Image (spheres, rainbow, N blue to C red):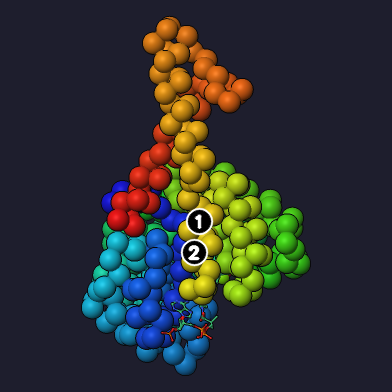
Amino acid sequence: MDQRARPYRSVLYIPGSKERALEKAKTLPVDAIIFDLEDAVSVDEKENARGILKDALAAGGYGSRMRIVRINGLDTQWGEADAKAAAAMDCDAVLLPKVESAAQVDALAALVGDKPIWAMMETPRGMLNAAEIAAHPQLTGFVMGTNDLAKELQCRFRADRLPMLTSLSLCLLAAKAEGIVIVDGVYNAFKDTEGLKTECDQGRDMGMDGKTLIHPAQVDVANAAFAPTDAEIDLARRQIQAFEETEAKGEGVAVVDGKIVENLHVVTAKEILAKADAIAALEG
Ligand SMILES: CC(C)(COP(=O)(O)OP(=O)(O)OC[C@H]1O[C@@H](n2cnc3c(N)ncnc32)[C@H](O)[C@@H]1OP(=O)(O)O)[C@@H](O)C(=O)NCCC(=O)NCCSC(=O)C[C@H](O)C(=O)O
Ligand SMILES: [Mg+2]
């Protein structure tokens, strides 16, 4: 499936060393999985996790879920071996943490051949260089790393995420300018469904494609938040129909529910229907 056309509502992290979680993920209705070799894996488990993950991916069973492998940074003692191992794994993309420049993406590209590369956006310098990172020809997705970002910004976690909005917006601008995927950071309090829903809604309203998750209990909330609602689908259909009728009369502006509909709104309406179809195809 074309990477931009597929849904990314729920993107679940799984520690690469946790065999039980690797198995469990095969049963979860997630759109994508990040198999983690970085922060979720202890130093003692790093080498072991690489082998466990390679075998798990080779065994298959992840269906149409997109499989992304997060390696350790290339400035760490594990990064290069992770990258070479990930290049040979049965996965769809390699995710590089703490990316701060296009040159770092180049360095990874030299190790992983033509595998698509995703970037963790989670440092102040990364935010400032988001445009050049997004423009790298092998880069197809951004993942917001809001825990590292909060650490680096020395900001507080707030329900409205005010201290992070500039960073989120810079990455959104860069991602949208290049037409790559962008998924939001994790919500740490994995038992707090209401808080998660609020943060998902905020990310969706800003233009995020989906949310990264840390626990199976978060999946349904993200899937619902990032899917078009029945009302949105109904409105999109009516907008397209009304505009076609208006166009047939030689006019350029229709009115639906008291609001104007022009060609650009029809583009959005068609995107909503395409996303709904893609979700239905994935779930079907
Ligand atoms: C947070 C956890 C440590 C909780 O684990 P646990 O206590 O085992 O949870 P449960 O007992 O409730 O688990 C119930 C079942 O679900 C499975 N499970 C749990 N988590 C996952 C998962 N992530 N993927 C798949 N399956 C999972 C358990 O195995 C149980 O299964 P079963 O027994 O068969 O019923 C744990 O959830 C966890 O480790 N989560 C992932 C943490 C992680 O990946 N962190 C790194 C990413 S966050 C980050 O680094 C972001 C970024 O870089 C930044 O800077 O922000
Ligand atoms: Mg991080």
Q: Give residue 107's position: percent from left, percent from top.
A: 41, 63
Q: Give residue 146's position: percent from left, percent from top.
A: 62, 65
Q: Give residue 22's position: percent from left, percent from top.
A: 37, 80
Q: Is residue 261 above or below residue 116?
A: above
Q: Give residue 178's position: percent from left, percent from top.
A: 46, 43
Residue in view at x 48 percent, y 84 percent? 41
Instruction: Assess whether mark 2 and mark 1 are in contact (beta carbons under 8 angstroms).
Output: yes
Q: What residue would you read off at disc 2?
A: 220
Q: Residue 122 carries which label?
A: none
Disc 2, ligand 1: is the CB inside 8 Å?
Answer: no
Residue in view at x 47 percent, y 36 percent? 234
In screen coordinates, is 144 left or right of 163? left
Quadrant that contains the C terminus: bottom left
Residue 173 can be seen, yes or no = yes
Q: What residue type is labelled 2?
A: Asp
Q: For the residue carrying disc 2, how many other residues have a C-alpha within 10 Å: few (<14), some (14-19), or many (20+)?
A: some
Viewer-nearest residue: 199 or 100: 199
Q: What residue would you read off at disc 1?
A: 224
Could you say whether the residue bearing mark 1 is in a helix, strand or loop?
A: helix
